[in-house]
């Protein structure tokens, strides 16, 4: 298992490069992960998506589908793809400290 | 490691519910992975983007020996029974219910969603002429009606997937 430093903290990564332990996550780690995903700054809208995903994961054990995410978070599909260019579900999940989403939708 | 896929062009040629969904799911899935996607609707596949037809697509129950009731592991439906009036209506209802359970949107909403992800949507010119259709028969997400030649031009660097 790979170990990498984010925001001065050594964290374990799973096979996809996502955090292996959710307890390693904090806002600074999120910011460092975002930079690695090509997102220099986490604005309010991005935090809205990240926090929503964390909440859903907490409750359901998997990241929400894009459809559910856009319906419930108030961020529509177009905006979501602008906020996290090139693969919103995967990127947002990684920044949120969650495993890669398992769903197809 | 093999080169990752960067772009896909998906052709949807069938107009049944089970003929349309796989292509839509693949297009949406591609965009979720950050892969560029284009959908080209041709022949009866066009029904998925015709305003008056897209909400009424049905499961084809005739000529499908894999059809089982009530689900995939149930007993096979004798093929002649597929033609019984109401069978397609019934199978369509069942499938729509299962699709909804998986949080997969109905066709119209799915097309809107996929278009919003940046996927381009095209109709086949030859079919449009054959079926005597015009651009205004289609839902607003259809970007253009294009020829096969234009489709290949737009598919430069793509993996082409025919469904």
Image: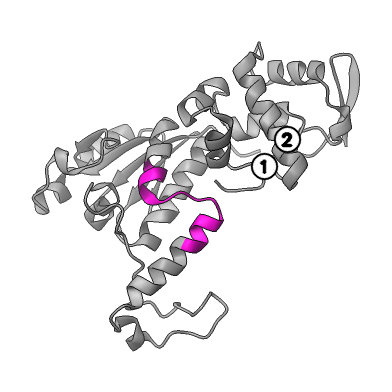
Which type of secondary structure does the marked residue at label 2 adopt?
Answer: helix
Residue closer to the observer: B152 or A15: A15
Residue drawn at x 32%, y 38% as measured from the top left: B121
Q: Of circles 2 and 1, which is in front? A: 2
Q: Residue furthest top?
A: A41
The chain containing the residue under callout 1 comes to A
What is the crowding at mark 1: few (fewer than 14 residues within 10 Å), some, or many (at least 20)? Answer: some
Residue drawn at x 88%, y 27% as measured from the top left: A11
Q: Is residue A81 magenta?
A: no
> With respect to residue B76, does B106 lie above or below?
above
The overriding secondary structure of the stretch rendered in magenta is helix
> With respect to residue A96, does A68 lie above or below?
below
> Can you tell which mark lies on residue A55?
2
> With respect to residue A21, does B132 lie above or below?
below
Residue B68: image x %, image y %?
Answer: 48, 79
Tell me the distance, in whole angstroms, between the alpha carbons under discs 2 and 1.
Answer: 14 Å
Residue at which label 1 appears: A101
Left or right: B28, with A51 as reference point = left
Residue B147: image x %, image y %?
Answer: 19, 40
| Quadrant where the image shows the N terminus of chain B | top right
Q: Which residues are magenta?
A: B97-111
Residue drawn at x 52%, y 41% as measured from the top left: A67
Residue A15: image x %, image y %?
Answer: 78, 39
Q: Is residue B4 visible?
A: no
Q: Is residue B110 magenta?
A: yes
Left or right: A52, with B87 as reference point = right
The chain containing the residue under callout 2 comes to A
């Amino acid at each position: 298992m790979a170990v990498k430093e984010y925001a001065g903290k050594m964290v374990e990564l799973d096979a996809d490069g996502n955090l292996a332990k959710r307890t390693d996550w904090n806002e600074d780690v999120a910011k460092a992960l975002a930079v690695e995903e090509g997102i220099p700054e986490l604005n309010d809208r991005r935090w809205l998506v990240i926090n929503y995903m964390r909440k859903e994961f907490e409750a359901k054990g998997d990241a929400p589908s894009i459809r559910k995410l856009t319906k419930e978070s108030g961020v529509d599909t177009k905006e979501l793809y602008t906020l996290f260019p090139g693969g919103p579900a995967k990127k947002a999940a990684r920044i949120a400290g969650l495993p890669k989403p398992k769903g197809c939708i | 490691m093999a080169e990752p896929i960067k772009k896909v062009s998906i052709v949807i040629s069938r107009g049944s519910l089970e003929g349309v969904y796989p292509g839509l799911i693949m297009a949406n899935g591609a965009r979720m992975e950050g892969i560029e996607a284009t959908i080209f609707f041709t022949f009866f596949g066009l029904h998925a983007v015709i305003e008056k037809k897209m909400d009424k697509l049905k499961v084809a129950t005739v000529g499908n020996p894999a059809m089982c009731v009530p689900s995939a592991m149930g007993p096979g439906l004798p093929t002649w029974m597929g033609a019984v009036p109401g069978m397609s209506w019934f199978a369509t209802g069942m499938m729509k219910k299962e699709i909804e359970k998986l949080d997969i949107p109905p066709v119209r909403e799915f097309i809107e969603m996929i278009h919003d992800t940046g996927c381009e949507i095209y109709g086949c010119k030859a079919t449009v002429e054959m079926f005597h259709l015009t651009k205004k028969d289609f839902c607003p997400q259809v970007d253009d009606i294009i020829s096969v030649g234009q489709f290949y031009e737009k598919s430069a660097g793509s993996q082409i997937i025919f469904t």
